[in-house]
Every structure is written in structure tokens, then in C-alpha cells.
Amino acid sequence: MRFAILGPLEVHTEDGTPVRVRERKVRTLLADLLAHEGQVVPADRLIDDLWGGTPPTDAHAALQTKIWHLRRALEAAEPGARDLVVSQAPGYALRAVHLDATRFRALLGEGRLDEALALWRGPALADHADEPFAAAAITHLEELRLTALEDQAEQRLAQGHPVELAALVARHPLRERLRALHMRALYRAGRQSEALDVFTQARTLLADELGLDPGPELTALHEAILRQDPALQPPRSDLPAALTDLVGRDDAVREVRAALERSRLVTLTGPGGVGKTRLAIEAARAHPNAHLVELADTDDPAQAVAQALRLPDTTDLTTALHARHPTLLVLDNCEHLIEATADLGATLLRRVPALRILATSREPLAIPGEHPWPVPPLDPAAAAELLLTRAPSLTPCDAAALVPHLDGIPLAIELAATRARALGADALAERLQHHLLTAEQRGTPPRQRTLRAVIDWSWDLLTEPERVVLRRLAVHADGCALDAAEHTCAEPHIDVADILARLVDRSLLSPGPRHRLLQSVKAYGLERLREAGELGAVRERHTAYYTALAEQADPHLRGPGQRQWLATLDAESANLRAALDHAPADHAHRLVDALAWYWFLRGRLTEARRHLARALRQGPNARTAAWQAAFTLLSGEPADPGAALALFHDDPAGLARAQWSLAFAQRGIGDDTVHLTDAALAAYRDLGDAWGTAAALSTRAAKALQSGDLLSLHRDAQAALDAFRAVGDRWGQSRAADLLATHAEIAGDYARATALRTKGLRLAEELGLASEISWRLSSLGRIALLTGDHDRSRELHTRAGRLAAEQANKPAEEFAQTGLALTARRQGHLDEAETHLRAWLDWMRRLDARPGSALVLAELGFVAEQRGDHEGALDLHLQGLAAARASGDPRAVALALEGLAGAHSLAGRHDLAARLLATAAATRRAVGAPLPAAERGDVDRIEARVRQARGTADAAPLTLEEISGVEEHRSRPVTRSTGRRRP
């Protein structure tokens, strides 16, 4: 909420809606609290301010009532605003975070006079000016305002602008500083006699009112006007006029000006083309006596300064600068004369106290008192704005596509704009690097007409060791750390770390810990690398380094170092991809094997399959083939695990991991994979691999869940959780905890299931595992569904589905979409439920995903039953029963039997329906998983129908022979739940 007292009292909500405080005394109370700006106002004083000498009988109770009304008014306007009014002994305070008076003072402190004065809407607290409590605050604020107006006038006069002060002087005739500013403004406007009259009036008024003479400053100014002192005339800057608007640099201009207020030497550093010169000139325009000194085409900085100041070559600069108004020298392009310029700057600053220097250079001058100010590239929004301003034919979408390739470098953007006008956006994007290095911008010095010329300028200033390191750095994608640079750039007698620091100083390389080249410098470096004949050898070094890094990281991704090493590989993703692009066969297979688990954890299934397929095209490899099959299955597509496993020879560790990963990837798909899991578990135990043992136990627990073996599910999941904790793997802990949560869910212990899944979600979020987060969100959505919170279930499943789709993880996406279908059906949205379910049924059948098919068919059958379509329901549930039997899960069989009971009851076969329900209940009891109350919605509905027809739902379970007879009633598949059979 925003409060304003610089004018009549006003209150607005965060979105600008006015807040009405209608009762007069409540409004006075608000003004009183605001006038004290967050300080506690004693209750007795508030009472006196509100009622004066006639307070009510119970004054404190009356005050509390007014406080209550104030809080209610604020709360009604913006929830939570009542808390701004706090009770604190001995009274009350209003903690206004956004008060214009506070903002006014802050802006004054930053020297932003225009913005500060713009906050005023009239006299402070104008509608409470007669209240005694407001007097001190009004006096203080008005004095600050008047001083700011004087400062503003002085600033504008210093910049050579006209200033009109007559009205302000008339309101404050005894302020000598204001009189002096008025006299100076009149004199500069050619109104000398009026300026002298102002002094005469001031002298008379001071004598009559105060018995005083004018002060020495005002008297000295009067004498200077009488002798027409040249120093009274404004200074003149000679900065070049701008041909175009400066885009995206408003904050930078303000910050550089502020830096010049604090420091007498500010050096703008940055790479060529980043806009140092343009920024320096714009920042210098606020100075009344600024001069641009071009150093690029001279070898004598002192002579260049003299020429800029229009002084004879023989003039002593120190003497000349002493005699001038305070001066700002803009020393542009200092880098090629860095030592001479630094010596000159240090000498002039030491001898001329009123001098300030704003330098531009690709490295700091490194002299005492210097304030280096690195000029950053434009942010993406500003870069797009500049591109669209210079090339209006482009669309915002075009700009968004081009900007990432331009590094935010204004020169690159200007050059791209010139090419865009000729080539168009698509052609430019294809040719960006080549064309930008050679594209020309006319009307600028030759060294700045092309990016190549800009970089050549820097390259020519480098030593040979610096050139070696710079060109070799270009093989890195998206930068590198120090150790990577040392490996790829090493040469005898070259200290790479020292050279990196020097390249950073020269603005050719970003500061560490991760060093990056601009795209243009990288392209230039690769050209120089080819010219030197080093490209192939340096790429080999690059590939060897990143292969070793991936192999070093791989075991740590299964232990307590997961987070750190995931972050390391995240940072090096671009370099790892570049290494894979250039890796020979042996390195390619080593790299994909080392990176496979990282890709899985990060949910990069498509990337993994692409690189694995590429490595296999270079030659066969058992581990690569096994990972390719596993990632194909994880992506929800069919694969042949047996073919991959047949390739293994004399690699027990690789075979064990392949057996486990393929078993893990076949969750609910195809034939029983228990033998793969058991083989992996035995192998891991023989190898003493604690992580592998935990992973195999976790997978065996998942298989036990699919077969309805709840005792084994709990035993193996708990053992896996303990083992994963022992090795410090948070991914494994999250997965094992989810299996235990499923066990609790089946038992109806939703509180424990929620706690376990929430912890699993937190572990996945800590590591940033998007696919795992999706699974955990869906699992929590299931619990929300079972506990009747359908809105929460829909929200969680929607989030999960979106994440899974982003990761191209079809199994996780199907799990989330099925959750949405479950939710929709329980909300009565049958069409929505069927749409979700039908979208995945063919996919499941193609993969032979029997558990999933059984659930989807059961849900579609219930949709048909709830629509009154008993034939469609019967067909679907019979198909579901077949899938359930094939999956080996007794609970899935029970669900199909319950669905069949619904279909038969709808057709009037109530006795059979009752026996089917009894059979389903017996099946669930047999595996220790009776249906919890929260999951009985369908059964209760069917039982009610049976009970209404028979008087009771009790019946004997069917025998195996009778169940077979039920299955013989199978109908042909239907296209939808309408009862129409497929032809």
C-alpha cells in the first residue's frame, strides 16, 4: 500500500486504486501517524491531537475505536494492510513501507533531484496544515524541498540552462543562496540591471527585517556582476551530437554519472563494440564543461588533450586547466597508450583538484583513485529493442530469435540490423557469424566499422602468448573453468592463469570462475586457430579433458556429491556436447557411458538417445547399446533388451548395470523382468556395489508392487531406502520412499503416504530432477484424489504432466494424464476422462504395458457404465481383466472384476454382479490389500444398485470355473463407450 503526504493526504493500493478513509478523525489519525514516519506516537498525544482539550470520557477506548476503523479501512482496500498499524508501547505506529516522503529523502541522497521534486503535488499535508501535530513535519519537509529546488537551480545553471526563480524568491525573500542563484540566472540571461536590483532589494530587506548586511557570498557575487567577471558565464562543452538514440542504457548513464560524483577518475572498460564511447559521451553531457579527447589516432595523449581544449601545443596543461571552470575530460580509447595515458591522468588529477576524467579502455588505467566501471552487454530486452529500432522490418519474434547470437553487443546488433535489411531474418540467422565479422557500418572510424576490425584492434595489442591462449580458448562452448583452460591452452613457459587474468583486464574474456568469450571473439579465435594449424590438436585436448571430467563425475552422481557434480555437469553441458560432436569412436563410447546417468537424472532422454545413436554409428559397443535400449524404453518406445545384453563379454560391472537399467526401464512393459532384476542384484552383491544393490532392491520392490506382493514390496523398498541413505544418494531415497508411500496408500494410511512423498519431492527438487519431480507430483495428486481434494489433485497432475512433456518422458506424462482422467471421472466429467484415457490406450498396447492398460481399460469401463452403456462397459472390463491377468497383479484383477460387476448389474444380472463383487473382495483380502474406504466409490455405487434389486449385496465368490465362464462372455472391442462394436 502506498501513502503520500507531499501534498494532500492520499492512499493507494499496490495497483493504484485510491483508498477512501471517509471519517474525518480517522483520516486525521492516519495523517498524524504518517507525519511521524513509522515512529511510535504515544496514545496520550494522539488523543490530544484528535480531540484537543475536550477528549471523550473514555479517551483511550475512543482512540482504540478509531484505530480499529483505520485498520478496517486499510484491510478492506488491500488484504493484510491492517497489519501496517501496529500497537507498541506507549502508543501506535504506522509502518508504511511506501511513503512518498521517505522516497523523497532517498532520491535526494542519490542526487536524483528531478525525480525527488516530481513527487510533490502541493504543500506537504495540505489538508492538515492547520493541525498542530503536522507543523514540525511540514516545516522539515518544506525546508528539504526548498533546498532541493536551490540545488536543482544550481545544477541547471551549471549545465548552462536558463532558470526562472522570481516566484520562489518572492515566497522566500530572506534566503541569500536563493537570491544569489536568481542574480546569476538574470545575469546570464543578459539582464544585468535586474540582477543588481535583486541584490539591492535583498540588502534593504535584510537591514529592515533582521538588522543585517548581505553575507560575503552574496556581496562577492554583486561585485563580480559589477565588473562583469567572465567566470560568471556558463562553460561550454564540445561533445559530439548523437545521431541516434541511446537504447537500453538509461540506468548505466545514471550510474556512471553517480560514479563521477564519487570518484574523480572513472574508467569504462569492456570489449570492443560494447558501447563504451557512446555511454561515456552520454554520461558526460550532464557536465557543463566536458571535452572528448580521441586517443585512437595519436601517440601523444598530452597533445590530444591540448587539441581537444583548443590550446596551443606549448601550453602547460596544468596551468590551463587551473584557469578554467571545473572540467571533465573524456579520454577515449586509452588501451593502445595505456601507460602514457595513465601517467598523464595521474599527473593532471594530482595537480588540478577540480578536474575529473572519464576514460574508456579495454583495460583499467590502474592508477590510485581509479573507479573501474565494466560496461555490461545489453540485456535481452534492451538488445531486442535496439535491433527493432534499427531494423523496423523485423518482428519481435525475429528479434527474439536473433538476439541470443549477438551477445548484447551494440555494435553487433547495429551490424545485424544493417544485414537484416538486406537478407531478412531467416537468412541472417543462418549466416550470422560470418556476416557479422565482415558486415560494415559506415560513418564510424575504420577500426570500428566491422567486428573483425574491432577485434583486430585488440589482437594487435596482445603478446604472442596471449594470442595463443585466446585462440585456443575458442574451442570451448559457453566458456570454461580455469583447469579446463590450462589443459587446452597449455604450452611450455606459458602461465595460462596469468594470461587469463590479463585477457580479462583487456576485456577479451569474462572474469572467472567461469571464463567466457563473446560469440564474435570466439568466431574470430576459431579463425585464428585454423590459421595457426592448431584446430584439430586443440579439439583433441578438449575432448580428452571433458571425457575425463565426465568419467570423474559419474560415480559421484550416485552418492553424497550428487548436487555438486550435477551442477558441474550442468555448467559444462555445452562443452560436453561439443566434445561428443568431435569425439572419435573410443572417446565417444566412453563419454556416453559416463554421461548416461547424468542424462537420466536430468530427464534429457532425447539428448541421450541422439548421442548414443551417434556413438553406435561410429562402431558397436555393449554398454552404449544397453543404454540406448534403456533410454528408448524410458521414452515410451519399444526396444530389444536381449540384443543389447548379448553384446556383453568379460564386463561383469557393465553387464550388471545393463541388466538393472533395462529392468528399471521396463516398468510395467512387456514380459516379466524379474529375472533381469534378480540377475543384476546377484551381480551387484558379488561386485560389492552398494549403490547397485540398492537400485536393484528398489526395482525388485517395484516389480513386487506390479505382482501384488505387498510384503516383498515393503521389505525391498525399506531395504533400498536404507541402502540409498547409506551411500548418500538422494535420487534413490526419493524413489524408494515413493514405493513405501504406495504401500501406505494401498493400506489407506494417507498421512504416511503424504509424508513420504513430500519428502521424496523435496529430495528431487533439491537436485533439480524434473522427471522425478513429475512422478512425485502425480503421486501426491493421487493422494489428493483419494482424500477428496479434487482441485488439488487436478493442480498437481497438471503440473506433473507439463513437466513430463517438457522432458519428453512419455511414461511420466501418461501417469499424470491418467491421474487427470481419474480426477475428471470422480468429478462427473466423463467426456474429459475418456479423452485423457483414450489418448494413451493405443500407446500402452503398442508397448504391451499391461498394468497401465488394465487400469485405463477399467476406467474406460466405469465411464461406459456411468453413462448406462452396459455392453460397452462389459467389453472394456473383459479386455481389462485379460490385461490384469497378464500383468500378474491380483489388485488389477480385482478392479476388473468390480468393473464387470457394474456392467452386469447395469444389464440386470444382479446375482452375477454380487458374486463378482464378492470375488473381487476375496482377491484383495488374499494379498492383504482390502479396498480402503476412500477407494470404494465405484464398489459402493454398484453394491447399491445390486442391493436395490436383490435386497442384499452379499453373495458367495465365484469358483475358478465360473470365472472362466464369465470371461467367455467377451465381446469384440468397441470404438468408444457407446455400445457400437467395431466392424
Image (cartoon, rainbow, N blue to C red):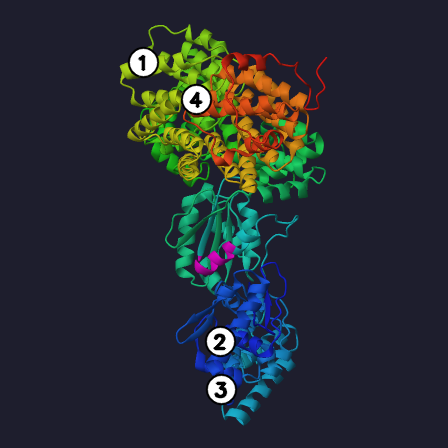
**357 lies above or below 631:** below
State if disc 2 and disc 4 touch (CB < 8 Å).
no
Measure how far apart labels 4 and 2 are at the Cα level: 66 Å
In the picture provided, is 402 more to the left or to the right than 99? right
| 4 vs 1, front mark | 4
| 4 vs 2, front mark | 4
Residue 716's image quarter?
top left
Element assignment for label 3: loop
- Which residue matches tag 3? 57
Label of residue 64 in the image: 2
For the residue pair 922 and 325, the one nearer the viewer reads as 922
Q: Where does the N terminus fall, quadrant-wise?
A: bottom right
| 3 vs 4, front mark | 4
**Looking at the image, is mark 3 or mark 4 earlier in the sequence?**
3
Label of residue 708 in the image: 4
> Crowding at label 3, few (<14), some or many (≥20) Cα neighbours within 10 Å?
few
Q: Where does the C terminus fall, quadrant-wise?
A: top right
**830 lies above or below 635:** below
- Which residue matches tag 1? 683
Query: Please, what is the three-letter code of the amino acid marked with disc 3?
Result: Thr
Residue 826 is one of the magenta-drawn residues: no
> Crowding at label 2, few (<14), some or many (≥20) Cα neighbours within 10 Å?
some
**Looking at the image, is mark 4 or mark 1 earlier in the sequence?**
1
Range shown magenta: 255-264
**Residue 81 rendering spot, x and y as whole percentages:** 53, 63
